[in-house]
Amino acid sequence: MFMFTLTKPRLRQAGALALCGACLAGTVTAAVHFSGDSIAAAAAVSDETVIQTTQDIATYFTGYGFEVDLSTAAVDKVKIPKSWDDSFAAFDQVVGESGLSLADYKGKTVEKWTALCPQRSDGENDTYCVLLVYKTRPVGAYLLEKPSGEVTGLVTAAQAVAQSAAENAGAAGESADGGNASGQGEAAAAGALLPDESAFPTE
């Protein structure tokens, strides 16, 4: 998707220290029960939103109901393509779920912050929260699954989590009907995924 990578040194150590400090201060909270418009309202990005530390990354994704493991935080320098094909335009639509767009940053170099999302990871299939930042301003956000490379929008993912939780609760008191509802929820979530991130153009 992007042209080159430069990793900041000692970021993992800084992330681990930030996580310890946040836990001691009691500032890391989980917010996983969102649905519909409440997700977008809770996590709306304003012109004053600034991303400068790993704690800012955690706060951003907590707004969508996703905790991140700050000890896994990493940041790369990446370049937004100047010209887009249909696949990158579709990718920008996924980014748009969080009220952001890369349209004004074509050809510009941005920071790509990633951090593991433990609640959606099992060691074999891991999901990372990804935030693209330009001069401390968030310009793009999505979830990236590895090793598949599939991406999904934050609102779609949060709604799928809420729907799955509701279906699981309903299935406890139901039989075959509850199982069918769960299967439909999984199919809807799978339909929201895009092709491998590496397939996007580099220029």
Image (cartoon, grey):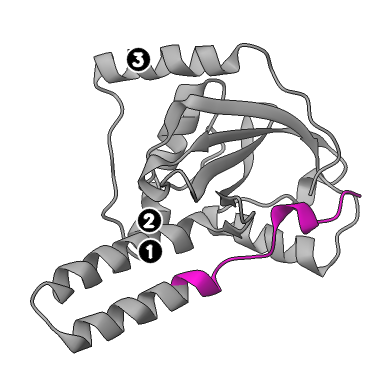
Q: Does the magenta portion include 114?
A: no
Secondary structure category for the residue under label 2: helix
Q: Is residue 145 above or below residue 175?
A: above
In the foreground, 107 or 115: 115
The answer to which of marks 2 and 1 sits earlier in the sequence is 2
Residue 93: % across, % down: 65, 63
Residue 77 picture quarter: top right
Residue 6 picture quarter: top right
Residue 111: % across, % down: 70, 31
In the foreground, 92 or 150: 150
Residue at image point 45% right, 43% down: 123
Task: Please say if the residues under marks 2 and 1 sit with CB atoms less than 8 Å apart.
Answer: yes
Disc 3 crowd rating (10 Å Cα; few below 14, some 14-19, many 20+) is some
The amino acid marked with disc number 1 is Gln
Per the model, the C-alpha gap separating discs 2 and 1 is 8 Å
Residue at image point 58% right, 35% down: 114
- Residue linked to disc 2: 39
- Residue linked to disc 1: 159
Magenta range: 189-203
Instruction: Give residue 20's mark.
Output: 3
